Amino acid sequence: MKTRIILCGACGKMGGNVLSLLSSDDEAMAVCGVDLFPKALSVPVYKTFDEIQEEGDVIIDFSSSQNLKERLEYAKNKGVGIVLASTGFTADDLALIDEYASTTAIFKTANLSLGVNLMQALVKTAAEVLGDAFDVEIIERHHNLKKDAPSGTALMLADSVNEAFGNSKQTVDGRSGICGERKKSEIGMHAVRGGTIVGEHEVMFAGEDEIITISHSARSKRVFAAGAIRAAKFLKGKKAGVYAMKDLLAEENK
Ligand SMILES: NC(=O)c1ccc[n+]([C@@H]2O[C@H](COP(=O)([O-])OP(=O)(O)OC[C@H]3O[C@@H](n4cnc5c(N)ncnc54)[C@H](O)[C@@H]3O)[C@@H](O)[C@H]2O)c1
């Protein structure tokens, strides 16, 4: 039986990409959507989760960090998994996600592409090898409609670098004015916004007389939509807990 998907944020750009891929998927299908601003699509779209008539197996969430509790509560009450692909979550939101993880299967990642998942491992290894002799700066570029900064992916990459330093570094968002010399404990974060850039991430290790850059460029939003569908298929029937790309890859490569 196909994995039945409830798509939160159905009327947005990512929602459109997911619906388009699902229309020709043999293993998964969209049963309905939820969107704060519903419009006519190929499946029914509701303004709230309370109105949903259809049964689903997994929610794919490409909406925003708003009303997170509504989605988690629905997933818990219905016993369905949820792929949280939205970004911009606050510390309180992350605590809420952890709370619901005791009863609900939650797949959470700020980036659903295979390339960025590999990049996380590469930047961690680079940081371990290069150590404090190299300053780490992260530059991300996105389209002019993106609402959060720095991107969830940039924060995820900073976390991977920081793991190599025993979480002793602090991120510093941009710099301006007389901000003084760069401290060794900094990971600089720089958010560029413009045009239709899908998503570019660059982690720069700047040492004495040499620079190493590890970068990833997404050329279309389809890569994230395909990742979300893959995650939904993986999550169907899983027990409660928080899952990430590495769990999906481990299962697929068994
Ligand atoms: N994890 C990833 O790999 C990845 C990739 C791309 C985008 N994203 C994230 O996905 C989200 C959506 O991106 P987008 O480009 O489609 O944005 P978008 O603005 O085009 O679409 C968002 C849609 O969600 C709806 N929405 C917003 N808040 C809602 C809520 N609380 N309940 C129901 N509907 C709501 C909006 O009305 C809109 O139709 C963003 O947070 C973005 O950062 C994540």
Image (spheres, rainbow, N blue to C red):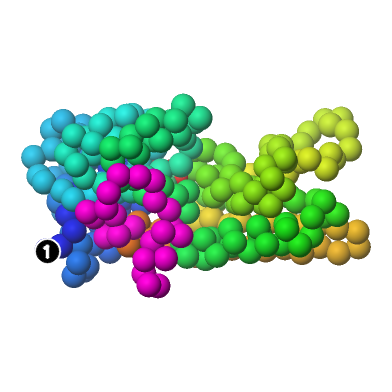
Which corner quadrant of the figure contains ligand 1?
top left
- Spot the residue most to the bottom: 253
Residue 99 visible in the snapshot:
yes
Q: Position of residue 199 (x, y in %)?
A: 53, 55
Q: Where is residue 232 in the image (x, y as percent from the top left)?
A: 29, 56
Q: Is residue 235 left or right of residue 119?
A: left
**Magenta segment, which residues?**
231-254
- Residue closer to the observer: 80 or 62: 80
Residue drawn at 30 percent across, 44 percent down: 240
Residue 11 visible in the snapshot:
no
Residue 242: in magenta span: yes
Q: In this view, does 220 lie to the left or right of 236?
A: right
Residue 113: in magenta span: no
Is the residue at mark 1 in contact range of ligand 1, meaning its CB lies under 8 Å from it? Answer: no
Location of the N terminus (image quadrant): bottom left
For residue 97, what is the image quadrant?
A: top left
Residue drawn at 44 percent across, 30 percent down: 95
- Spot the residue most to the left: 53
Residue drawn at 13 percent across, 38 percent down: 52
**Residue linked to disc 1:** 1
Image height of 115 relative to 232, above or below: below
Q: Is residue 123 left or right of residue 220?
A: right
Q: For the residue marked with disc 1, what is the amino acid?
A: Met
Q: Is mark 1 on a helix, strand or loop?
A: loop
Q: Where is residue 133 in the image (x, y as percent from the top left)?
A: 86, 54
Q: Is residue 166 left or right of residue 117?
A: right
Q: Where is residue 53 in the image (x, y as percent from the top left)?
A: 8, 40
- Spot the residue most to the right: 209
- Residue closer to the observer: 229 or 72: 72
Location of the C terminus (image quadrant): bottom left
Q: Count residues near mark 1 (Cα–Cα under 10 Å), then give few for <14, some for 14-19, many for 20+.
A: few
Residue drawn at 71 percent across, 62 percent down: 126
